[in-house]
Image (tube, rainbow, N blue to C red):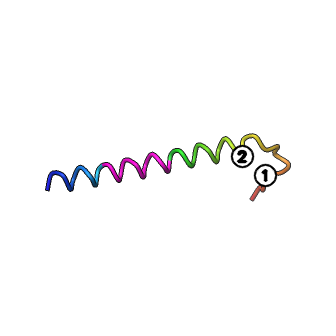
C-alpha cells in the first residue's frame, strides 16, 4: 500500500512538473513573438 502511494505521488509530482514546464515553455515561446503577431481578445 505504501508503494502504491509512492507511485501515485510520483505521478502527481511529474504531472505538475510537466504542466509547469509546458506553461513556461509556451510563455517563453510567445514572449519572443512581437505583439503584432499575438492574438488579442
| Dominant SS in magenta | helix
As measured in the structure, the alpha-carbon distance from the residue carrying label 1 to the one carrying label 2 is 8 Å
Q: Position of residue 14 (x, y in %)?
A: 40, 49
Which residue corresponds to mark 1?
A: 38
In the rendered structure, find residue 28 and report the number of the disc placed on it: none
Q: On the rendered structure, is 29 left or right of 25?
A: right
**What residue sits 67% from the left and 41% below the top?**
28
- The answer to whether 11 appears left or right of 3 in the picture is right
User: Quick check: is 11 in the magenta stretch?
Assistant: yes
Quarter of the rendering occupied by the N terminus: bottom left
Secondary structure found at label 2: helix
Residue 35 is left or right of residue 11, and the answer is right
SS at mark 1 in the image: loop
Q: Where residue 17 sits: x, y (%)? A: 45, 45
Magenta stretch: includes residue 6: no
Q: Tell me residue 41's x, y (percent).
A: 74, 59
Q: Name the residue rendered at 61%, 44% in the picture.
A: 25
Residue at figure coordinates x 78%, y 44% from the top left: 33
Residue reaching furthest right?
A: 36
Q: Residues within 10 Å of mark 1 (few under 14, many from 20)?
A: few
Q: Residue furthest left?
A: 1
Q: Give the range drawn in magenta.
A: 10-19
The tally of labels here is 2
Which label belongs to residue 30? 2
Q: Do the residues labelled 1 and 2 touch (CB within 8 Å)?
A: yes
Label 2 packing within 10 angstroms: few (<14), some (14-19), many (20+): few
Q: In front: 5, or 33?
A: 5
Q: Which of marks 1 and 2 is in front?
A: 2
Between disc 1 and disc 2, whose residue precedes? 2
Amino acid at each position: 500500500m505504501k508503494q502504491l502511494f509512492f507511485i501515485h505521488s510520483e505521478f502527481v509530482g511529474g504531472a505538475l512538473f510537466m504542466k509547469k514546464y509546458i506553461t513556461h515553455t509556451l510563455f517563453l515561446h510567445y514572449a519572443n513573438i512581437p505583439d503584432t503577431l499575438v492574438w488579442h481578445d
